[in-house]
Image (cartoon, grey):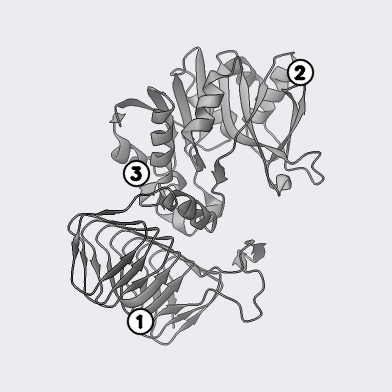
Amino acid sequence: MQAVVLAAGEGTRLRPLTFTKPKVMLPIANKPILEHLIDELVKAGIDEVVLIVGYKDERVRNHFGKEWNNVSIEYATQRKQQGTADALKAASHLVNDEFLMLNGDAIVSSNDITKIVKANGNVIAVKEVPNPQDFGVVEIQNGFVKSIIEKPEKPATNLINAGIYKFDEKILDYVERTQLSIRGEYEITESISLAIANNEKFKAVRIEEWIDIGYPWDMLKANEYMLNKIERKIEGKIEENVVIKGKVVVGEDTIIKSGSYIVGPTIIGKNCEIGPNSYIRPYTTIGNNCHIGICEIKNSIVMTNTKIPHFNYVGDSIIGENCNFGAGTKIANLRLDDKEIHVSIKGRKIPTGRRKLGAVVGDNVKTGINVSINVGCMIGNDVFLAPHTKVEGFIEPYSKVF
């Protein structure tokens, strides 16, 4: 079975992290989102993958090459991101008579993929969620999809389109007939609606394990989900007087120095220097070549080549690549009134659904000593934060804040 994976999107809702990399290459549990997906496809028996790429596609091509995990990889380029139907059209010359189609920015399980593969005919995966108004809402009749309505104000059901499909080649005829939507895109849901109107059947298959990564804070939920699956594995050097509790992974050539206290589930990558006297709390992922010193890291994603060395606190945060925190830099992760944290993006206040959320920090950010970063702060790439600065809101890339 062939899988066609949509990996061309820019991921504007995941900024500032996607200013420098495509959303499918953002790391969860020290692996890109797309790598997790391909691994699950392999477990489900998929033997051929077509990646539809576009935005910063060199990051995807260089990582996966022409073969990954014994699966052949082919690429199609969607030069201008104009929707999911347009993406499939860009790959139409590569697809088989029957194929899966999936979004590359979601966490799904091989068990659910297998259910879809084994189902007869065309399939749409559906999932029950508490916030259906944010997705395409699916109505079902006698086990088949009756309609899909994108982001309705008053959803008829809690079942949403999970963005996983099994198609036969006839879907390409309806893709050709698909018109531009009111959102300015050629959408595969409109292609499906045209097919349904022409008496084509699409079986609705309910899936269990699915995490949509739409906003940066969704990465923390996905990271927690993936870390719950790990097993303890210590490959680095552990000095005396180090405490390691629970499921902890320590990569090759990493050194955990004396006095450090690490609680799993946690992953620490290769060639890291941890400690002395680091406190790393559960659901933390630290990338390769990082230095974590006398500080506390909790429920966070710290990407490759980042240094957090001196008397820092990082909680419920996502820190990009090649960052360097000055001594005493601290990130707040809880409002004083204990209420839900909202994030400000381009003048809009967006609810996160989280009571605890620190900061989202892009690549190549440097802070001076004693910088204070407030809850829900979004910091673009290549930002310089001067000593003793208080930071809040959205900081544009390449800014200097004094």
Instruction: Using the image as rendered, state which of residue 266 and residue 380 is in the foreground.
Output: 266
- Quadrant of the rendering where the C terminus is positioned: bottom left
Query: Who comes first in sequence, dot 1 or dot 2?
Result: 2
Q: Is residue 179 above or below residue 286?
A: above
Instruction: Using the image as rendered, state which of residue 208 and residue 66 is in the foreground.
Output: 208
Measure the alpha-carbon separation of dots 1 and 2.
61 Å
- Quadrant of the rendering where the N terminus is positioned: top left
Residue 149 rendering spot, x and y as whole percentages:
75, 35
| Residue that mark 2 sits on | 197
Q: Residue at x 61, y 22 (%)?
A: 123
**Callout 1 touching callout 3 (CB < 8 Å):** no
Measure the alpha-carbon separation of dots 2 and 3.
40 Å
Q: SS class of the residue under badge 2?
A: helix
Residue 385 rendering spot, x and y as whole percentages:
41, 78
Which of the 4 image quarters holds residue 19? bottom left
Q: SS class of the residue under badge 1?
A: loop
| Residue that mark 1 sits on | 368
Q: Is disc 3 surrounded by few (<14), some (14 to 19) or many (20+) residues within 10 Å?
A: some
Query: Who comes first in sequence, dot 1 or dot 3?
Result: 3
Q: Is residue 56 above or below residue 384?
A: above
| Residue that mark 3 sits on | 59
Which of the 4 image quarters holds residue 235? bottom left
Q: Is residue 332 left or right of residue 346?
A: left
Instruction: Name the residue type under label 1.
Output: Gly
